[in-house]
């Protein structure tokens, strides 16, 4: 790779804002990087350059995969926490987003931001923050998961499906099921999965109890993506019917439409409410209705709630493949948007 790519400086806040061709090129590069993991062809792309990682929320895969990705590209990833920085909030004086973005813009070659659930006062606030940083910074802003979207996870999911189902996913069916769970999770992973799988020509299904509806705009985008590909989009409130003939089963908990009120997330109330829906667990009996379907999940898995151990650790589970893919797709994104 020589010179700046056409992606140089490009933000990744959601895959919906990249073309299908750009997404496929990124996936192909990620697949090549996986095959040639430590090849000198790639190990100098970010030599002596730093990627800034702004963590409002903790993680397992995200920090590890981004730090390792930067290292394997010859660069460095710097871990930052808002609590260690004097940033302006609605309650405290401090540095504005404009000024913080301007400084980071002079230091790093890219900025990743992770902001979820309890670090925002209402749905959409995390997405607004990323877009505000993008407004004031010339370096690429990469979502490391925020309240609306998780683009790197979406790419990792599709990379897994391409490996197990073939690179042409058109006409394959993915079903997204709300999962009985005790974590009160954000909508980001499932919404990103809906968007990118519909872009790749998959039939998309979504099932959840009433009261757990997803983002209206994301639903409309998904419908539009399916219409453009001549594929189907289905919504259901049944915990079992959407398994029928599915090639991929994606079972994950997410919070209800009443999760935020009074400027805060009512997490315990969400957990208590979710645990009442005992029919919404992915188990072997339901998986038998699928087309020998793959089990997919962005992790961490809430075992015995979202899914049984039998399914999560079974022969058709690809959760570890997808977790590994985070490293490779992030290397590809960083190389394309930050490399020279």
Image (cartoon, rainbow, N blue to C red):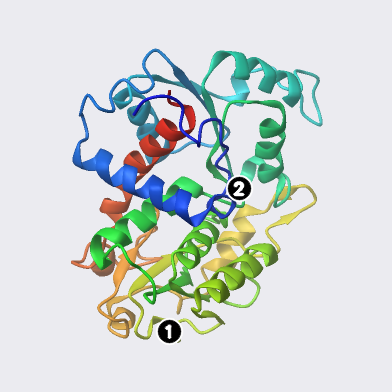
Residue beneath label 1, please? 240
Q: Secondary structure at mark 2?
A: helix
Q: Is residue 273 left or right of residue 96?
A: left
Q: Position of residue 312 (x, y in %)?
A: 28, 63
In the rendered view of the protein, which quadrant contains the N terminus? top left
Q: Position of residue 223 (x, y in %)?
A: 60, 73
Looking at the picture, tell me which residue is in the foreground, 113 or 277. 113
Quadrant of the rendered image containing residue 118:
top right
Residue 259, relative to residue 278: is it above or below? above
Q: Residue at x 43, y 84 (%)?
A: 240
Residue 171, relative to residue 103: is it above or below? below
Q: Position of residue 87 (x, y in %)?
A: 71, 21
Number of the label disc, if any, that sits on residue 76: none
Residue 227, relative to residue 53: is it above or below? below
Q: Position of residue 171 (x, y in %)?
A: 39, 77
For the question of whether residue 300 can be seen, the reply is no
Whichever of callouts 2 and 1 sits on the residue coming sooner in the sequence is 2
At label 1, counting other C-alpha atoms closer than 10 Å, the crowd grade (few under 14, some 14-19, many 20 or more) is: some
For the question of whether residue 121 can be seen, the reply is yes
Q: Is residue 12 left or right of residue 120?
A: left
Quadrant of the rendered image containing residue 331:
top left
Q: Secondary structure at mark 1?
A: loop
Q: Is residue 317 left or right of residue 306?
A: left
Looking at the picture, tell me which residue is in the foreground, 269 or 78. 78
Q: Residue at x 73, y 50 (%)?
A: 122
Residue beneath label 2, please? 117
Q: Residue at x 24, y 68 (%)?
A: 310
Q: Residue at x 72, y 47 (%)?
A: 264
Q: Is residue 35 left or right of residue 159?
A: left
């Amino acid at each position: 790779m020589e010179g700046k790519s056409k992606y140089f400086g490009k933000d990744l806040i959601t895959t919906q804002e990249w073309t299908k061709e750009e997404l496929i090129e990124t996936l192909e590069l990620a697949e090549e990087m996986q095959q040639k993991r430590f090849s000198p062809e790639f190990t100098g792309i970010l030599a002596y350059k730093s990627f800034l990682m702004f963590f409002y929320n903790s993680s397992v895969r995200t920090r590890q995969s981004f730090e390792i990705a930067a290292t394997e590209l010859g660069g460095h990833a710097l871990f930052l926490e808002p609590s260690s920085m004097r940033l302006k909030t609605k309650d405290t004086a401090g540095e504005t987003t404009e000024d913080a973005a301007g400084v980071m813009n002079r230091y790093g070659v890219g900025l990743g931001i992770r902001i979820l659930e309890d670090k925002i006062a209402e749905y959409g606030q995390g997405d607004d923050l990323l877009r505000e940083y993008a407004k004031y910074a010339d370096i690429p802003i990469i979502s490391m998961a925020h309240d609306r979207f998780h683009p790197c996870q979406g790419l990792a999911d599709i990379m897994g499906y391409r490996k197990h189902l073939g690179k042409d996913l058109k006409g394959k069916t993915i079903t997204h099921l709300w999962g009985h769970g005790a974590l009160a999770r954000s909508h980001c992973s499932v919404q990103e999965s809906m968007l990118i799988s519909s872009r790749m020509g998959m039939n998309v299904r979504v099932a959840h109890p009433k009261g757990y509806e997803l983002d209206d705009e994301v639903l409309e985008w998904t419908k539009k993506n399916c219409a453009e590909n001549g594929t189907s989009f289905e919504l259901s409130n049944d915990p079992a019917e959407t398994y029928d003939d599915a090639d991929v089963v994606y079972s994950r908990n997410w919070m209800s439409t009443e999760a935020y009120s009074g400027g805060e997330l009512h997490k315990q109330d969400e957990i208590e409410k979710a645990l009442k829906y005992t029919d919404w667990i992915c188990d072997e009996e339901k998986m038998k209705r699928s087309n020998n379907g793959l089990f997919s999940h962005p992790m961490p898995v809430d075992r015995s709630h979202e899914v049984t151990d039998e399914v999560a650790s079974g022969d058709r589970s690809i959760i570890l493949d997808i977790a590994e893919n985070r490293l490779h797709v992030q290397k590809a994104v960083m190389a394309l948007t930050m490399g020279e």
